[in-house]
Every structure is written in structure tokens, then in C-alpha cells.
Amino acid sequence: MPGAAHRASDNTTENIGGCHAQAHHLAGRLGCHHRRGSSTDGNRLQATFTTGPPVSVTPNLGMVELILSGTGTVEGFGAATEVVGLVEDRAVTPCGAGSYSDTVSRRVVVHGGVLVLHEAGMTCVTASGLQASGTYEVDGQASTGIFAGARGTGDVTVNLATHTETLSGKLILAPAAA
């Protein structure tokens, strides 16, 4: 899921939200619908980014660490960049042979703030190839600017065959200071 890198020796592809790093390039754009309102009106977060090859690949003791970066857009906020730190635990097989668990820390930067997400998931072998899925949680304490104090959770899916990754869930911004 979050971060589902195919193989450390492969090109990396990033599965954000799940975050996947299999150095093929992923298509992406981040769509975030935001409204300032009550903390119970569930704002939506939709995301996809295009990433380059990993900056760092470190296979060791069954763990693969990847750092990826990408560009995209956030609806309502404009152009965005991201940096993703991904750890794949290849020593566990949550959904059978060839699968692994993923842990991700994602930083999305837009004019006006930085949105920090933490993700957990798994990458599984399916008839159509590797598929990553997981969940994300907004880190409002680490986020800055317009995202400071934000909260929310959601799902991440990545189709490694098509290099498509999607974040879908809630993003609730903190009320603006008066």
C-alpha cells in the first residue's frame, strides 16, 4: 500500500497514499476540495502525482527504503510538489507470496502551506499485477500554513500497471484565526 515499490533493483514507482515506489513514472495530480466550516463537514482529499526515480534506495534486512519526489496540482491551491519517504517490509507477506507491507511519510507543498500525511498499507500481487492499498492520516501538528491543525483520514490505492495512485478521503482544515 503506502509506498509500494516493486523491487529495489527496479525503477521505482510511487504509490502515494499508499505510496508506491517502482521507478517508472507515476501520473498524478492532487485534488483537494477545501472549505472552512464546521469541523464536522467532511472536506475531500483526492491526489495523484508524477514522480521521478527514487533519490535513495536502501535494501537491507528485508526492508527497502525509498525517497521519491513528484509534482502535481491541488485543486483550490494550485501547483504542488511532494516528497515521500517509503519503507517496504519485504520480510512480511500480508496478502501472500510477493506481497509486502508499506509505511509512508508524505509532504505535500503548495503556496500557503505544507500538508503532512502518514500512511500504512500493503502491496499485493493480483491477476492484473501489483496493487497497493492503504490508509492515510493527516498530521495537523506537523503541517504548516493553511494546513496547520488540519485533520482527516482516507484511503490510498495504487495500480502499478497503469502507474495510477489515488488518495481519497477527508481533509478538515482548522478554523481560521480571527
Image (tube, grey):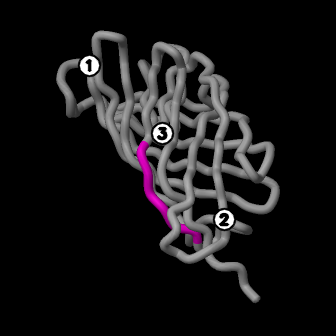
Q: Locate the C terminus and report the quarter of the image it occupies.
A: bottom right
Residue plotted at (51% across, 27% down): 21
Quarter of the image with the N terminus in it: top left
Start-end of magenta stretch = 150-155
The residue pinned by badge 1 equals 98
Compare residues 127 and 81 and report the one nearer the observer: 127
- The residue carrying mark 3 is 86
Residue 111, image x and y in percent? Answer: 81, 55
* Mark 3: amino acid: Leu
Q: Residue at x 51, y 63 (%)?
A: 42
Few, some or many C-alpha atoms within 10 Å of disc 3 (few <14, some 14-19, many ≥20)? many
Residue at 66% across, 28% down: 50
* Residue 54 as seen in the image, left or right of residue 145: left
Q: Is residue 136 left or right of residue 109?
A: left
Q: Secondary structure at mark 1?
A: loop
Give the percent coordinates (x, y) of residue 140. Answer: 56, 68
Q: Is residue 125 left or right of residue 88?
A: left
Q: Is residue 76 above or below residue 39?
A: above
Identify which amino acid the numbered label 2 is placed on.
Answer: Arg
Please identify, in this view, whether the residue under mark 1 or under mark 2 is nearer the observer.
Answer: 2
* SS at badge 3: strand
Disc on res. 35: 2
Give the image quarter of residue 53.
top right
Residue 24 in picture, x, y percent from top left? 58, 16
